[in-house]
Every structure is written in structure tokens, then in C-alpha cells.
Amino acid sequence: MIKSMTAFSQVSHTNESLTVDVTVRSFNSKSLDIACYFPESCQAFEEDIKKIIAKIHDRGRIEIRLSIKDEAKDLEQFEIDVPRALSYYQALKKIKEDLNLSSDITLDHILTARNVIVPSTKETDKGSLWKAISQCIETASTNLDFMRRQEGKNLHVDLAARMDEIEKNIKEIEIDARGVPLIYKQRLMERIAFLTSDSEVLDPVRISQEAAILADKSDVSEEITRIYSHIKQCREILESEEPGGRKLNFLIQEFNREFNTIGSKAGNASLSHKVVDLKSKLEKIREQVQNIE
């Protein structure tokens, strides 16, 4: 079962007062490239999160965006900066003494100082936070894999149909190619007839040898045999449970090499046109293969 590298997954999970929202997107890539966009409180979990993703996915750029919301009632607290308050009190006391003031120094006077009492956020328990995050990431990763498999099914159908078209065209080329050696031999005979029109006739044995050499150079049976082998391998990869994107990409290169060789040996316009049509179909397959894991 082939899988696409492009997909999307979004999951929200609540564990007690913690709510974790995760969005995962995957794109085409030559290797597995995981990019994480987390709040500072989650940075410590980055490597563990990547391991969860890597257990299922083998290729693609996977971007993970994570947000945390903690609705605990005692989450917001306040801290007292005692040294600052004491220093401010000492300053007020000195002013009172220097100016010989009779009024008392009260709490209200101290609270006028900035940052004596400041809000603080209660640190979320790391164990509870990781439990919520890991469950959310695992679900998102599984959902992403499901979407990639679903898209992979569509790619499988499309590629199988295109491979059938290539096989059909190759069979037509195989029939046309049988007449190529005769075409080269006829051209050779016409050329020799022209060059020897005013001289003695060349040795027929020699002409046959040259024709045989040309026929061998114009023979595409080996290329066609390899193409049939590539078609068989391609179908096996499409049916395999293992990731096949890299293998298919290599096969596309092999197909293209054989098509180029056949095109260079083509002895007539009809055969050349069929090779061009094959290369056009192959390019469409190559574009689809770029999406496969």
C-alpha cells in the first residue's frame, strides 16, 4: 500500500485542566524532516514527539504546531519581592528621618513601589503535561497516516492505469520495431546503389554484413525486454506494504533511459512519435511519484 506525503491532521485533547491542540501537516521531501513549533513550556518534549512521528512516517516534511491551555483555578498566583519591599521601606524611613516627618510609614506607602507584588504563573506538572501532549500527538500522527494512505489509494489507481497504458504502447512499439532492420537495410541498399551507379557492383556478401551490423544497432528487443521488467517491478512496488517512493523514482529514471535508447534507434516517424508519447506519459507518472512516501 503506497502512501502520499501530503496530508493534514488536527487533534484536540483534554486531560484534567489541560487542553492540548495539535495541527500536523505533511509535504513532499526526499527524507523525513520534522519541524516543531511549540510554546516554551513544551520545548523539552521535542525529541520524544519526533520519535512518536518517526514510528509511523518514513518520508516527508512534517510540521507540528502545538498549543497548551491550562484552566486550573489556582494557576495564577502572586509573588512578593521582599528585598525590594525592605529596600523601599528603608528609603521611606530615611526620608522620614531626614525631613523630620511625624507620619507613620504604612503598607499603602510600600505598595506604591513598582514590582513589590508581581503575578506569577504556577508551573504545570511535567508528567500531566507530557501525558496530554503524547496522547494528542499519537492520535494526530495516526490520523495523518490514515489520510496519507487514503490519498495513496488514489495514487495507486492512477499509476496502475498509466502503467497499463505504457505497457499497451510498448506492445505497439514492439510490433513496429520488427520492421526497423528492414528499413535500415533498404536505406543502405539505396545509398550503395547511388554511390556505385558509375562503377562496378559491390560484393553482395559485404553488403549483407553491413546490413547485419546496422540491423543489430537498430534492434530494440533488449530495451523492450527491460521495459517489461520495469513494468513488473513497478506493479510489485505498488502492491507492497513497504514505502515505495524512492524505488519508483529510480524506476522512472530507468524507464526514461530505455525510451531514449529506443528513440535514438527509431527508423521511422511513426515509431519516433510513439516514443515521444511514451515519454509524455512517463513525465506525468514522475510528477505523481514525487508525492509518494
Image: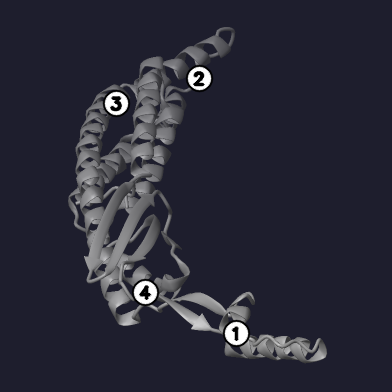
Residue lying at 20% horizontally and 50% vertically, measured from the top left: 236
Q: CA distance from mark 2 to mark 4?
A: 104 Å
Foreground: disc 2 or disc 4? 4
First reached walking from the N terminus: tag 3 or tag 4:
4
**Mark 1 lies on residue:** 106
Q: What is the secondary structure assignment of the residue under circle 3?
A: helix
Amino acid type, callout 2:
Leu
First reached walking from the N terminus: tag 2 or tag 4:
4
Mark number, residue 293: none
Q: What is the secondary structure assignment of the residue under circle 1?
A: loop
Looking at the rendering, which quadrant does residue 151 occupy? top left
Q: CA distance from mark 2 to mark 1?
A: 128 Å
Cβ–Cβ under 8 Å for marks 2 and 4: no
Q: CA distance from mark 2 to mark 3?
A: 34 Å
Crowd band around label 2 with a 10 angstrom C-alpha radius: few (<14), some (14–19), many (20+)? few
Q: What is the secondary structure assignment of the residue under circle 4?
A: loop
**Mark 4 lies on residue:** 75
Mark number, residue 202: 2
Image location of residue 252, percent across then percent down: 37, 43
Foreground: disc 2 or disc 3? 3
Q: What is the secondary structure assignment of the residue under circle 2?
A: loop
Residue nearest the viewer, comparing 293 with 88: 88
Image location of residue 16, percent across then percent down: 22, 71
**Mark 3 lies on residue:** 173
Q: Is residue 196 visible?
A: no
Foreground: disc 4 or disc 1? 1
First reached walking from the N terminus: tag 2 or tag 1:
1
Cβ–Cβ under 8 Å for marks 3 and 4: no
Cβ–Cβ under 8 Å for marks 2 and 1: no
Eyeballing the image, is 71 above or below 172? below
Q: CA distance from mark 3 to mark 1?
A: 101 Å
